[in-house]
Image (spheres, rainbow, N blue to C red):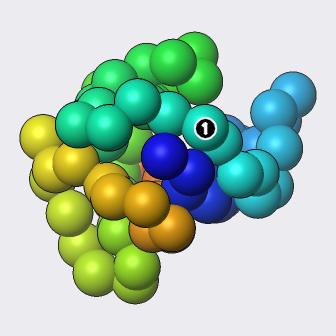
């Protein structure tokens, strides 16, 4: 299946902004993030088709997965 993955902020460093990936059916958001070399502990928000999702959700064909880092501030 194909999905579009969008990375935000520091997750783009050395990677990409937006990319269409060919993935196996039934893969979890967690596995996708790990396959990109991103530490899941650094992830603040994940969204599928502009709706919040969990690390255990499984995107389907033509979904858009957005991955945002934790936001810090002072």
Camera sees residue 44: yes
Q: Is residue 5 left or right of residue 33?
A: right
- Residue 46's spot in the image, x, y percent? 35, 58
Q: In this view, does 49 lie to the left or right of 53?
A: right
Q: Nearer the viewer, residue 71 or 27?
A: 27
Residue drawn at x 35%, y 69% is 48
Q: Mark 1 points at which residue?
A: 22
Q: Residues within 10 Å of mark 1 (few under 14, many from 20)?
A: few
Answer with the quarter of the image where residue 28 lies: top left
Residue drawn at x 50%, y 34% is 23
- Residue 20's spot in the image, x, y percent? 71, 51
User: 71 above or below 27?
Assistant: below
User: 46 above or below 52?
Assistant: above
Q: Which of 22 and 4 is in front in this view?
A: 22
Number of dots carrying numbers: 1
Residue drawn at x 48%, y 46% is 1
- Residue 47's spot in the image, x, y percent? 35, 67
Q: In this view, does 61 lie to the left or right of 12?
A: left
Residue situated furthest bottom in the rendering: 50
Answer with the quarter of the image where residue 61 lies: bottom left
Q: Which of 2 and 6 is in front in this view?
A: 2
Camera sees residue 9: no
- Residue 30's spot in the image, x, y percent? 29, 31
Residue drawn at x 76%, y 58% is 18
User: 27 above or below 58?
Assistant: above
For label 1, the SS is strand
Q: Is residue 13 left or right of residue 50?
A: right
Answer with the quarter of the image where residue 26 lies: top left
């Amino acid at each position: 299946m194909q999905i579009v993955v969008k990375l935000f902020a520091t997750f783009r460093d050395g990677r990409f902004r937006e990319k269409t990936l060919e993935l196996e059916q039934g893969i979890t958001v967690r596995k996708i993030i790990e396959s990109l070399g991103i530490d899941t502990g650094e992830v603040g928000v994940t969204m599928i088709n502009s709706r919040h999702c969990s690390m255990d959700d499984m995107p389907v064909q033509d979904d858009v997965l957005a991955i945002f880092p934790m936001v810090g501030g002072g």
